[in-house]
Amino acid sequence: MSESPLDLRRYTPSADSDDDRFDTEDGWVGDWSDWSQPTDHRDTDHGAPAAPPGFRQVGRSFAPARADRGPGRVIAGLAAAFGIALLVLVVITLALHDTASPVTEAPLTPLPDPLPIPSVVAPSSPTYAIADCPHTRTPALASGTEPGDTTSAVSVIFAFQHAYYVERSGTTAREFVTADAKVPSAEGIQAGIDTVPAGTKYCVSIVPTAPAAWQVHVREQRPDAAPELLATLIFHTVTDPDGVNKISEISEGQ
């Protein structure tokens, strides 16, 4: 028999042979199949060196041993992470506080005091005026109990009636008529005033009828009596070069 390793014939050792390729316990025979088809029966780690301290074996090489991952190490890692996060938060807070521009509030402007609201009081009629006597002036009608003056024809008629009923003075009434007027004297006017009880109320209405001519309605209300139409008179007026108006004639109207 050939001794060539390529001889595929099954080799059977003799009983007194020292060839250890035949394992009598598990029936394994070492031949070409031993090289081409390894089996798990062979102990591949047999005789491998042990890993040095601080390393662990990975296959046929060594790697650093893994660190201890016990509970204490996990807690220490969490505490370190929390401390870093807290430090970052403090740094950010301080940075924002230093860089934030201060807010300057504009000074408050005091509001002005509210304007007083004027109270609107309806003009009350004089105590010497009849209750239903309207106080008005238009080109077509003037009515009321104004004190009057000499600035216009209507005003001088009001002034004459005011002297008669309120001031109760014939002399004052005569000041509003011309010297040659067809009007009684101051004494004659006073005599007429004395026939009117004190406290008598009145109302005058003036309507123009012609240039410098006026129809005047005089109403009276004597104490404890109802108002009544006393007379309808015709007044004539004149205006002097200085613009002063006076009465030139008083007559009975229709």
Image (spheres, rainbow, N blue to C red):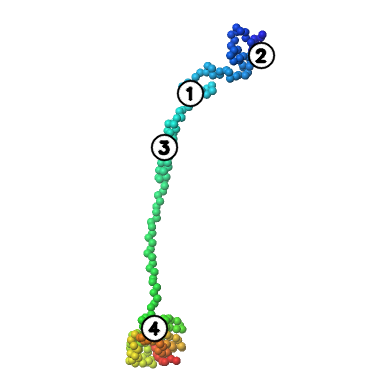
Instruction: Give amino acid for label 3.
Output: Gly
The structure residue drawn at horizontal position 40% and vertical position 89%, both measured from the top left corner, is 230
Mark nearer the N terminus (4 vs 1): 1
- The N terminus: image quadrant: top right
Quadrant of the rendered image containing residue 42: top right
Instruction: Give amino acid for label 4.
Output: Ile
Q: Please state the horizontal and vertical placement of residue 249, each as a whole percent of the image.
A: 40, 91
Q: Please state the horizontal and vertical placement of residue 141, each as a whole percent of the image.
A: 45, 83
Q: CA distance from mark 3 to mark 1?
A: 33 Å
* Residue in front for this viewpoint, 151 or 69: 69
Decide: marks 2, 4 in contact (CB < 8 A)? no
* Label 1 Cα crowd, 10 Å radius (few <14 / some 14-19 / many 20+): some
Front position among marks 2 and 1: 2
Q: Which mark is residue 83?
A: 3
Judging from the image, what secondary structure is the residue with disc 1 in?
Answer: strand
* Label 2 Cα crowd, 10 Å radius (few <14 / some 14-19 / many 20+): few
The structure residue drawn at horizontal position 38% and vertical position 80%, both measured from the top left corner, is 125
Front position among marks 2 and 3: 2
Q: Which mark is residue 8?
A: 2
Decide: marks 2, 1 in contact (CB < 8 A)? no
Q: Residue furthest front?
A: 25
Instruction: Give amino acid for label 2.
Output: Leu
* Label 3 Cα crowd, 10 Å radius (few <14 / some 14-19 / many 20+): few
Quadrant of the rendered image containing residue 132: bottom left
Judging from the image, what secondary structure is the residue with disc 2 in?
Answer: loop
Mark nearer the N terminus (4 vs 3): 3
Q: Please state the horizontal and vertical placement of residue 78, each as a whole percent of the image.
A: 44, 35
